Image (tube, grey):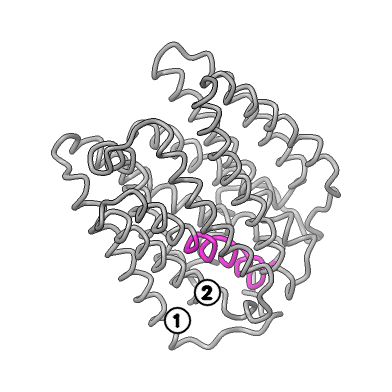
């Protein structure tokens, strides 16, 4: 799992930085199409693999696909939606994403029971391909500002924008450290399910479905909240703390039915984590820097995830699974609480307040 996580993270990090340079100069729509083509190609790599190397190769392509899709989707949303509607728009996108997680994991678990993994792969490939014509229907909008020649200075500009904005700096630290711990949980979760919950096979898929149900509820609340704009940064920190609380209950109790409920709780934290973060970046960052700042956040989070994957890979059998996950959950709660406290001393900007270029 650590190698698999690293296989996904490495192209995600490098690709996100590259896309951050391209997306603000070219077409977010066509970059999204390229991303979904890569995602479709990743399925047969895993489907017909005869060893773990094929699975690792598939993860590399998935990482490259998401590195293309994520900055493009963020930039495209910022171009299509005005400031006051950004939280709702990102919440609605998150609803679709979390609904797919629920349906996909429940459906995959059921297919594994009645058929085989081949059926899961076949349907996954078809659905990934179906996304391409849907993306083609999106308007081809592009940022209207000056488009200078691409250079590495743009990466430094995106990093400076994120770091010099007080709230973005707090969110960069909270989400970066938070994702380090979340990645540890994701890597160790299959071992916890097998050795502590004593469940096999599709039980993990049902736990992920419960996570998706919780995330869906959080996304639904975000999409319909009339008080979210202006509070996005606090919601991100609250989401990190809620994820941690769910992880502590999930692993601390060690009972399958309780784990299902705790997975839903942790999922609701994810629903409060990502949509407000994207909406906040889109609201306070200049239009011509949205893609590269989003890429900086994505690359930072995945870099921290890659670091934790490598640490677990080195430690190997010396890792005590259950205590490690419980500690990670407790630290997530602490990080979220510290972030909330740090934000209290900062005045929220108005809806039209954007960081100067």
Quadrant of the image occupied by residue 118: top right
Task: Give the percent coordinates (x, y) of residue 195.
Answer: 23, 38
Badge 1 element: helix
In depth, the one of 328 and 172 nearer the eye is 328
Instruction: Identify which residue is drawn at 54% across, 54% down.
Output: 213
Residue 68 located left or right of residue 213:
right
Q: Secondary structure at mark 2?
A: helix
Sequence-first disc among 1 and 2: 2
Taking depth in this image into account, of 165 and 236 the one nearest to the observer is: 236
Q: Position of residue 96 (x, y in %)?
A: 67, 51
Is the Cβ of the residue at disc 1 closer than 8 Å to that at disc 2?
A: yes
Q: Quadrant of residue 91?
A: bottom right
Question: In this picture, which residue range is highlighted in magenta?
Answer: 268-286
Label annotation for residue 165: none
Residue 277 sits inside the magenta stretch: yes
Residue appearing at x 46%, y 35% in the figure: 8
* Dominant SS in magenta: helix
- Farthest-out residue, left: 318
- Residue in the picture at 41% in, 18% down: 53
* Within-10-Å neighbours for mark 1: few <14, some 14–19, many 20+: some
On the rendered image, what quadrant is the N terminus found in? top left
What residue is drawn where x is 72% and y is 62%?
A: 78
- 30 sits to left or right of 326: right
Residue denoted by label 2? 233
Instruction: Give the crowd class for mark 2: few <14, some 14-19, many >=20 residues within 10 Å.
Output: many
In the figure, 116 relative to 187: above or below?
A: above
Write down the residue under mark 1.
Answer: 343
- Where is residue 353? Give x, y as percent: 66, 80
* Residue 86: % across, % down: 70, 68
Q: Quadrant of the C terminus?
A: bottom right
Depth check: give the residue in front, 216 or 347. Answer: 216
């Amino acid at each position: 799992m650590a190698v698999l996580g690293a296989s996904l993270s490495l192209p995600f990090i490098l690709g996100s930085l590259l896309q951050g340079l391209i997306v603000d100069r070219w077409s977010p729509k066509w970059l999204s199409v390229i991303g979904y083509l890569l995602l479709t190609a990743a399925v047969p790599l895993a489907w017909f693999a005869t060893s773990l190397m094929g699975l690792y190769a598939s993860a590399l392509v998935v990482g490259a696909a998401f590195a293309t899709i994520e900055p493009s989707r963020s930039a495209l949303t910022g171009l299509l939606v005005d400031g006051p509607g950004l939280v709702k728009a990102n919440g609605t996108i998150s609803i679709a994403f979390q609904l797919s997680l629920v349906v996909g994991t429940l459906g995959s678990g059921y297919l594994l029971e009645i058929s085989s993994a081949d059926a899961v792969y076949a349907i996954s490939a078809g659905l990934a391909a179906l996304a391409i014509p849907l993306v083609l229907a999106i308007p081809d909008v592009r940022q209207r500002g000056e488009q200078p020649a691409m250079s590495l200075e743009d990466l430094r500009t995106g990093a400076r924008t994120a770091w010099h904005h007080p709230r973005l700096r707090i969110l960069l630290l909270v989400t970066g450290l938070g994702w380090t711990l979340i990645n540890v949980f994701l890597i160790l979760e299959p071992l916890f399910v097998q050795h502590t919950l004593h469940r096999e096979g599709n039980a993990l898929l049902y736990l992920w479905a419960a996570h998706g149900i919780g995330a869906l509820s959080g996304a639904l609340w975000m999409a319909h909240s009339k008080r979210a704009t202006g509070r996005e940064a606090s919601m991100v920190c609250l989401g990190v703390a809620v994820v941690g609380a769910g992880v502590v209950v999930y692993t601390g109790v060690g009972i399958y039915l309780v784990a299902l409920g705790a997975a839903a709780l942790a999922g609701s934290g994810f629903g409060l984590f990502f949509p407000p973060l994207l909406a906040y970046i889109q609201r306070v960052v200049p239009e011509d820097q949205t893609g590269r700042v989003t890429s900086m956040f994505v690359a930072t989070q995945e870099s921290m995830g890659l670091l934790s994957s490598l640490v677990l890979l080195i430690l190997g059998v010396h890792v005590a699974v259950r205590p490690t996950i419980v500690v990670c959950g407790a630290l997530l709660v602490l990080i979220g609480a510290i972030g909330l406290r740090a934000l209290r001393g900062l005045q929220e900007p108005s809806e039209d307040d954007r960081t100067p270029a």
